[in-house]
Image: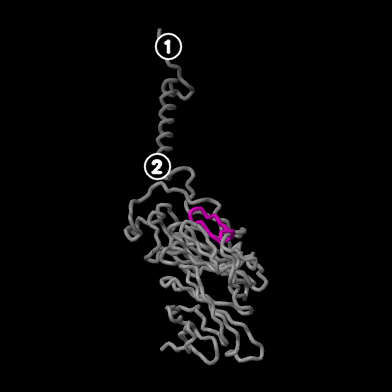
Amino acid sequence: MRSRPTRTDAGLTSLQIAFIAVGSALVLLVGYVIFLLVTGSEGDSGTPTPTTGSASPGATTDPSPTATTPAYADWADVPPGNRPPFVAGRSGEPAAREWADWVWDLIDDAWDVEVWCDPNPGYEPFTETGDACLYQALYLVAPDLERVRIYELRTDVMLGIEATAMDEQIVWISRYYYESVQTVQFNLADGTVDENWAHDGFTNVTAPYNQEGWFVFHSGTLPSGRMVWEGSGYAEPLRGVFFRDPGGAITPSNLSSNFGGAAGEPYCLGLDPDAGIAIYESYEYAEGQPIANWPAELVKHNVLADTWTTQSRLGPYGSPCHDDFEVTSAYYVGLANRVDQSGLYRYFFDGSPDQAVP
């Protein structure tokens, strides 16, 4: 004899209750599947939020894959409506879109990197009291100048971009302190920082602090992708030169262990990447003497062959650090820094008289 379904106090049979329970479970399961399809995996964190005020710029959460990756070959092909939404920026912050990992597929050497700092009016730079910025962030800048904010950065020191290797997702960030500069290697993919990236670039004992990125500057990048870096000191001459090849291999220049620069005043460096020639210029104060009698030194460095020549004379050569720097086999164009010259001059390697540039 088949037993009759029993009723609960609500007037439902036990069989009806079973059907309801099974139906509810199916609804929950379907709902969860839809949630995963819409939001992606549970590890997604959206725009990464790097550490602020820490010892180095770095992310607390790494950029992670987004749920949907649009199929575009170039950023210019992405309609504005399909680009990531704009972030709710701070007052004065440049307009920027949120980060999405599919943007990596569109980034090439035409992109740039930018840092924005919201200055702290209470910051005292001479004593470095307080944070330099109220807020600081890192942006990738597309060829159409639209920005994508990828990281929030530390605020205790002002930061700047020294160099980029976009195909490697690497940028070099300079930390600007009152009397010093430290350049660190920053991984755009995960926000990690390497302060010892240049350690193998210096072989001379006069520049130990350069090995942690202090006073290390990017001179330029050759057409081959080889980067030329220099190390100096605070108000000091050249201490070392090294090369970084694509992929990260670092090679010290022979110049690093054979040339210390003229004693005394800061040197200046200019690089013509197409010619493969770098010019290093320095001079030394001669107390009581007119500037035309100050000892000066010039190094012409063939960075392709890693060979150089050194010339000395009285009276500073022109500074190669300016926007119109040019070097040929016969001369370089320098910015005059002496009272009897003004503007741009051609400084000849064979000792011919300096020639004003019209």
Tell me residue 289's x, y (percent). Answer: 63, 91
Q: Residue furthest top?
A: 1
* Residue at point 44%, 24% (across, down): 17
**For the residues marked 2 and 1, what is the alpha-carbon distance in whole angstroms?**
45 Å
Bounds of the magenta segment: 184-199
Q: Residue at x 49, y 83 (%)?
A: 335
Task: Look at the image and say whether residue 216 sits in the magenta stretch.
Answer: no
Q: Is residue 5 left or right of residue 136?
A: left
Mark 1 or mark 2, which is nearer the start of the sequence?
A: 1
Who's the residue at 45% across and 89% down the image? 356
Residue in the picture at 45% in, 81% down:
331
Let me know if residue 125 appears in the view: yes
Q: Which mark is in front, 2 or 1?
A: 2
Name the quarter where the N terminus is drawn. Answer: top left
Residue 118 in view: no
Instruction: Answer left or right for 15 relative to 202.
Output: left
Residue 295, numbered circle? none
- Image position of 302 (left or right of 197): left
Q: Secondary structure at mark 1?
A: loop
x and y percentages locating residue 139 in the rendered image: 47, 62
What residue does disc 1 label?
3
Q: Tell which of 145 and 234 is nearer to you.
A: 234
Q: In terms of depth relative to the viewer, which is nearer, 48 or 191?
A: 191
Frontmost residue, 344 versus 118: 344
Q: Which residue has dot 2 on it?
A: 37
- Left or right: residue 84 versus residue 269 is left
Give, as a three-letter code, the residue at label 1. Answer: Ser
